[in-house]
Image (cartoon, rainbow, N blue to C red):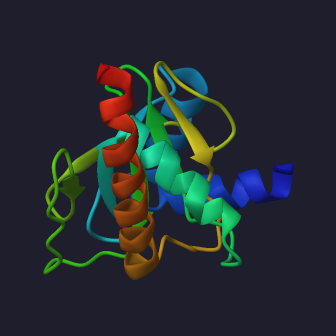
Amino acid sequence: MNEVMWDRGVEWLAAAAKDPRICKRDWDQGEGIALLEAGRYWDVLSVPDRLGMLALDLLWQSARPVPGPTLVDTAAHRVGFFLPPDPGSRWIGAGLRHAGRGSWVAVPPPYRPARFVEWLVPPDGTGSLHAPVTLELALRQANGTLAVLTPLHTQ
Protein backbone atom coordinates (compact mmCIF):
# COMPACT_ATOMS: atom_id res chain seq x y z
CA MET A 1 0.00 0.00 0.00
CA ASN A 2 1.49 3.36 -0.96
CA GLU A 3 1.60 6.56 1.07
CA VAL A 4 -1.28 8.24 -0.80
CA MET A 5 -3.54 5.25 -0.07
CA TRP A 6 -2.43 5.30 3.57
CA ASP A 7 -3.30 9.00 3.82
CA ARG A 8 -6.74 8.39 2.29
CA GLY A 9 -7.25 5.38 4.57
CA VAL A 10 -6.29 7.46 7.62
CA GLU A 11 -8.73 10.23 6.66
CA TRP A 12 -11.53 7.75 5.96
CA LEU A 13 -11.08 5.94 9.29
CA ALA A 14 -10.55 9.10 11.34
CA ALA A 15 -13.83 10.52 9.98
CA ALA A 16 -15.61 8.00 12.24
CA ALA A 17 -14.02 9.57 15.34
CA LYS A 18 -15.70 12.28 17.41
CA ASP A 19 -12.60 14.41 16.78
CA PRO A 20 -10.56 13.19 13.78
CA ARG A 21 -7.53 15.30 14.77
CA ILE A 22 -7.30 13.69 18.21
CA CYS A 23 -7.77 10.27 16.62
CA LYS A 24 -4.84 10.82 14.24
CA ARG A 25 -2.69 12.19 17.07
CA ASP A 26 -3.46 9.10 19.20
CA TRP A 27 -2.41 6.88 16.31
CA ASP A 28 0.88 8.76 15.87
CA GLN A 29 1.80 9.65 19.45
CA GLY A 30 -0.33 7.52 21.75
CA GLU A 31 -0.78 3.77 22.01
CA GLY A 32 -1.64 3.50 18.33
CA ILE A 33 -5.27 2.49 18.93
CA ALA A 34 -8.38 4.60 18.49
CA LEU A 35 -11.86 3.62 19.65
CA LEU A 36 -14.14 4.39 16.73
CA GLU A 37 -17.91 4.23 16.76
CA ALA A 38 -19.50 1.69 14.43
CA GLY A 39 -22.83 2.24 12.73
CA ARG A 40 -22.24 5.55 10.98
CA TYR A 41 -19.80 4.76 8.16
CA TRP A 42 -19.46 1.04 8.72
CA ASP A 43 -20.39 -1.92 10.90
CA VAL A 44 -17.98 -4.69 11.89
CA LEU A 45 -18.71 -8.40 11.93
CA SER A 46 -16.26 -10.11 14.27
CA VAL A 47 -15.76 -13.87 13.91
CA PRO A 48 -13.41 -16.48 15.43
CA ASP A 49 -9.99 -16.21 13.78
CA ARG A 50 -9.91 -19.65 12.11
CA LEU A 51 -13.28 -18.98 10.47
CA GLY A 52 -12.32 -15.42 9.53
CA MET A 53 -8.94 -16.30 8.03
CA LEU A 54 -10.45 -19.08 5.94
CA ALA A 55 -13.30 -16.84 4.78
CA LEU A 56 -10.86 -14.06 3.86
CA ASP A 57 -8.77 -16.55 1.90
CA LEU A 58 -11.90 -17.58 -0.03
CA LEU A 59 -12.71 -13.93 -0.72
CA TRP A 60 -9.19 -13.36 -2.11
CA GLN A 61 -9.39 -16.41 -4.36
CA SER A 62 -12.62 -15.44 -6.05
CA ALA A 63 -12.91 -13.27 -9.12
CA ARG A 64 -14.58 -10.60 -7.00
CA PRO A 65 -13.04 -7.21 -6.23
CA VAL A 66 -10.43 -6.91 -3.48
CA PRO A 67 -12.02 -7.67 -0.10
CA GLY A 68 -13.02 -4.78 2.13
CA PRO A 69 -11.15 -3.63 5.23
CA THR A 70 -10.41 -6.52 7.58
CA LEU A 71 -8.78 -6.48 11.03
CA VAL A 72 -7.27 -9.26 13.11
CA ASP A 73 -7.01 -9.19 16.90
CA THR A 74 -4.39 -11.81 17.74
CA ALA A 75 -5.01 -11.56 21.52
CA ALA A 76 -8.76 -12.14 21.21
CA HIS A 77 -8.37 -14.58 18.29
CA ARG A 78 -10.92 -12.65 16.20
CA VAL A 79 -11.15 -11.30 12.65
CA GLY A 80 -13.31 -8.22 11.95
CA PHE A 81 -14.90 -7.56 8.57
CA PHE A 82 -16.01 -3.97 7.83
CA LEU A 83 -19.49 -3.88 6.26
CA PRO A 84 -21.94 -1.17 5.23
CA PRO A 85 -23.94 0.06 8.23
CA ASP A 86 -27.23 -1.80 8.55
CA PRO A 87 -29.19 -1.33 11.77
CA GLY A 88 -31.59 -4.13 10.82
CA SER A 89 -29.03 -6.79 10.01
CA ARG A 90 -29.05 -10.06 11.94
CA TRP A 91 -25.91 -12.14 11.82
CA ILE A 92 -26.55 -15.52 13.41
CA GLY A 93 -23.91 -18.14 14.09
CA ALA A 94 -21.61 -19.51 16.75
CA GLY A 95 -19.10 -16.87 17.79
CA LEU A 96 -20.39 -14.12 15.46
CA ARG A 97 -20.51 -10.61 16.93
CA HIS A 98 -22.02 -7.69 15.04
CA ALA A 99 -20.89 -4.17 16.02
CA GLY A 100 -23.29 -1.52 14.78
CA ARG A 101 -24.59 1.81 16.08
CA GLY A 102 -23.71 2.25 19.74
CA SER A 103 -20.72 -0.11 19.54
CA TRP A 104 -17.06 0.88 19.62
CA VAL A 105 -14.21 -0.82 17.78
CA ALA A 106 -10.48 -0.65 18.62
CA VAL A 107 -8.75 0.35 15.39
CA PRO A 108 -5.06 0.86 14.57
CA PRO A 109 -3.96 3.23 11.81
CA PRO A 110 -3.89 1.70 8.32
CA TYR A 111 -0.10 1.95 8.11
CA ARG A 112 1.00 -0.14 11.13
CA PRO A 113 -0.19 -2.63 13.75
CA ALA A 114 -0.81 -1.57 17.35
CA ARG A 115 -0.77 -3.89 20.33
CA PHE A 116 -2.49 -7.06 19.14
CA VAL A 117 -4.60 -5.43 16.40
CA GLU A 118 -3.54 -5.11 12.79
CA TRP A 119 -5.03 -4.81 9.34
CA LEU A 120 -5.16 -7.86 7.11
CA VAL A 121 -6.75 -5.66 4.43
CA PRO A 122 -6.29 -1.97 5.31
CA PRO A 123 -8.85 0.60 4.20
CA ASP A 124 -7.83 2.31 0.99
CA GLY A 125 -9.82 5.47 1.64
CA THR A 126 -12.40 4.89 -1.09
CA GLY A 127 -15.03 3.72 1.37
CA SER A 128 -15.16 0.23 -0.12
CA LEU A 129 -16.50 -2.35 2.33
CA HIS A 130 -17.30 -6.06 2.31
CA ALA A 131 -20.55 -6.90 0.53
CA PRO A 132 -22.72 -8.62 3.17
CA VAL A 133 -24.04 -11.32 0.82
CA THR A 134 -20.56 -12.15 -0.48
CA LEU A 135 -19.16 -12.27 3.04
CA GLU A 136 -22.03 -14.48 4.23
CA LEU A 137 -21.37 -16.97 1.43
CA ALA A 138 -17.64 -17.05 2.22
CA LEU A 139 -18.37 -17.57 5.93
CA ARG A 140 -20.80 -20.42 5.16
CA GLN A 141 -18.26 -22.10 2.92
CA ALA A 142 -15.48 -21.61 5.49
CA ASN A 143 -17.72 -22.95 8.25
CA GLY A 144 -18.46 -26.05 6.17
CA THR A 145 -14.75 -26.61 5.62
CA LEU A 146 -14.00 -26.21 9.32
CA ALA A 147 -16.79 -28.65 10.21
CA VAL A 148 -15.06 -31.27 8.06
CA LEU A 149 -11.54 -30.46 9.33
CA THR A 150 -12.34 -30.20 13.05
CA PRO A 151 -13.06 -33.93 13.55
CA LEU A 152 -9.69 -34.72 11.97
CA HIS A 153 -7.91 -32.70 14.66
CA THR A 154 -9.68 -34.53 17.51
CA GLN A 155 -8.69 -38.02 16.43
**What residue is shown at x 60% (from left), y 43% (from top)?**
120
The residue closer to the viewer here, 84 or 12, is 84
**What residue is shown at x 58% (from left), y 64% (from top)?**
59
Q: Is residue 28 left or right of residue 30?
A: right
Q: Looking at the picture, does residue 88 appear above or below residue 40?
A: below
Q: Is residue 124 visible?
A: no
Count of marks overlaid on the render: 0
**What residue is shown at x 26% (from left), y 67% (from top)?**
39
Residue 86 placement (x, y as % from top left):
24, 79
| Quarter of image, res 85 | bottom left
Q: Is residue 109 left or right of residue 147?
A: right
Q: Is residue 101 visible?
A: yes
Q: Looking at the picture, does residue 108 appear above or below residue 21?
A: above
Residue 124 placement (x, y as % from top left):
68, 62
Residue 76 placement (x, y as % from top left):
31, 25
Considering the image in quadrants, where does the C terminus appear? top left
The residue closer to the viewer here, 65 or 148, is 148
**What residue is shown at x 51% (from left), y 36% (from top)?**
108
Residue at the front extreme? 155
Q: Is residue 126 left or right of residue 16?
A: right
Q: Looking at the picture, does residue 17 appear above or below residue 117?
A: below
Q: Is residue 73 left or right of residue 21?
A: left
Residue 134 placement (x, y as % from top left):
46, 77
